[in-house]
Image (tube, rainbow, N blue to C red):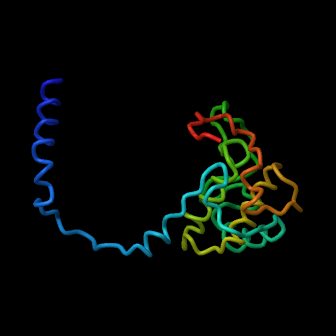
Amino acid sequence: MYMRNFTLLIFIMMNYAHAETIQGPNLGKPVSSAVVDRWNRDIFPNGEGLPTGAGSAYKGKIIYQQQCLSCHGVDGAGGSADELAGALHSLTDDPPDKVVGNYWPYATTVFDFIRRSMPLHAPGKLSNDEVYAVTAYLLALNGIISEDKIIDNNNLSKIEMPNRDGFINTFKK
């Protein structure tokens, strides 16, 4: 096994110099730097990468009812998509309930996921303020923040999630 892997490695290294002459399957098309910049939206647990904006749970509830309720149910209780709040079981129960309040380690991750992936029928459709508002609503539903708290790019990363230490932390603060 070792010898076969070593031989393959040597073959790859010997042919690496000729890689520019190898033709690919010609799939896709080159992407402009503007497109890459639009999709390069990394957000880190410390808040780096968060866009400017703000939102409250009050506004988030309205947006949730318009954009999220059909899949995630009333008050995040679940529907055709996973539940987001109201866990009846802990993570150590069988079956566990993985909701925003007991599973997600960082509030910035909740924001990032909503911003990239929701609503399902039109990912990325929500404005930054709308994403902050929906995030606030989900955090309030899970008892992590009060309904009247306004979250923004300055304070979202400071919110302590209940499962913050439930994952291996490779991120340096």
* Residue drawn at 63 percent across, 32 percent down: 94
* Residue drawn at 81 percent across, 66 percent down: 56
Name the side, left or right, on which 24 lies relative to 91. Answer: left
Residue 147: x, y in percent?
Answer: 87, 60
Residue 159: x, y in percent?
Answer: 77, 49
Residue 49 quadrant: bottom right
Look at the picture and state if 15 lies above or below 7: below
Look at the picture and state if 102 lies above or below 27: above
Residue 118 quadrant: bottom right
* Residue drawn at 66 percent across, 68 percent down: 70
* Residue drawn at 75 percent across, 59 percent down: 154
Residue lying farthest front? 17
Q: Nearer the viewer, residue 158 or 65?
A: 158
Give the total number of marks visible in the rendering.
Answer: 0
Q: Nearer the viewer, residue 113 or 19?
A: 19
Name the side, left or right, on which 2 lies relative to 132. Answer: left
Name the side, left or right, on which 155 lies relative to 23. Answer: right
Quarter containing the C terminus: top right
Residue 97: x, y in percent?
Answer: 67, 42
